[in-house]
Amino acid sequence: MLGYFVALAVVVWIAQTVLGLRQFKKFNAHLKELRKLGRVAIGRARGGFRAGILVLFVIDPYCRIIKGEIMEGRTVFTGFKPFDDFNGVTLFELSEDLCKGMKLNARQTAAVVSARHDYENYLKIQDEELVAD
């Protein structure tokens, strides 16, 4: 009996690994397509027991958001959906107050603000590399 549970656990672990790799590959292909439209800022809010959230914002050379997408869910079958609430907004204007005004939940707000912070950190690193050269 114990052998069946061990075998089942191994099968479930393998299935989870295969499906997770498939989702990662699908995400990378989707990101590559979005990068054809412009630079992409990525924000995330980790899940734990709640749904994890990923936000992708395509930005123009002036850091205005031209396209947004969100992936919100607990399973590897979750996909991206349009998230155009911020189209036309400058990435640096994203804040908790703006998100609350748009009635986003706390997890969505965290992902949106994370996109701004992560992009600001990316720019800071780019500036430091230019100074070092």
Image (cartoon, rainbow, N blue to C red):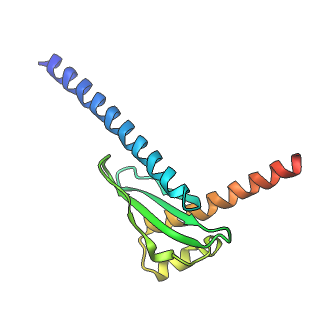
Q: Identify the image quadrant of the N terminus.
A: top left
Left-right relation of 122 to 111: right
| Residue 72 lies in quadrant | bottom left
Residue 108 lies, with reference to residue 49, above or below; the image says: below
Viewer-side residue, 11 vs 105: 11
Q: Quadrant of the C terminus?
A: top right
Write the residue at 75% across / 56% down: 124
Q: Residue at the location (45% across, 80% down)?
A: 102
Q: Is residue 14 left or right of residue 93?
A: left
User: In this rendering, is residue 30 above or below 82?
Assistant: above
Q: Is residue 95 left or right of residue 69?
A: right
Q: Identify the residue at image location x=30%, y=48%.
A: 75
Left or right: 93 as drawn, with respect to 124: left
Task: Give me the residue at 68% from left, 71% from top.
Answer: 62
Percent position of residue 78, x then y: 32, 53
Place of residue 41 in the rendered image (x, y in percent of width and height, measured from the top left): 57, 60
The location of residue 15, given as percent across then percent down, is 27, 32
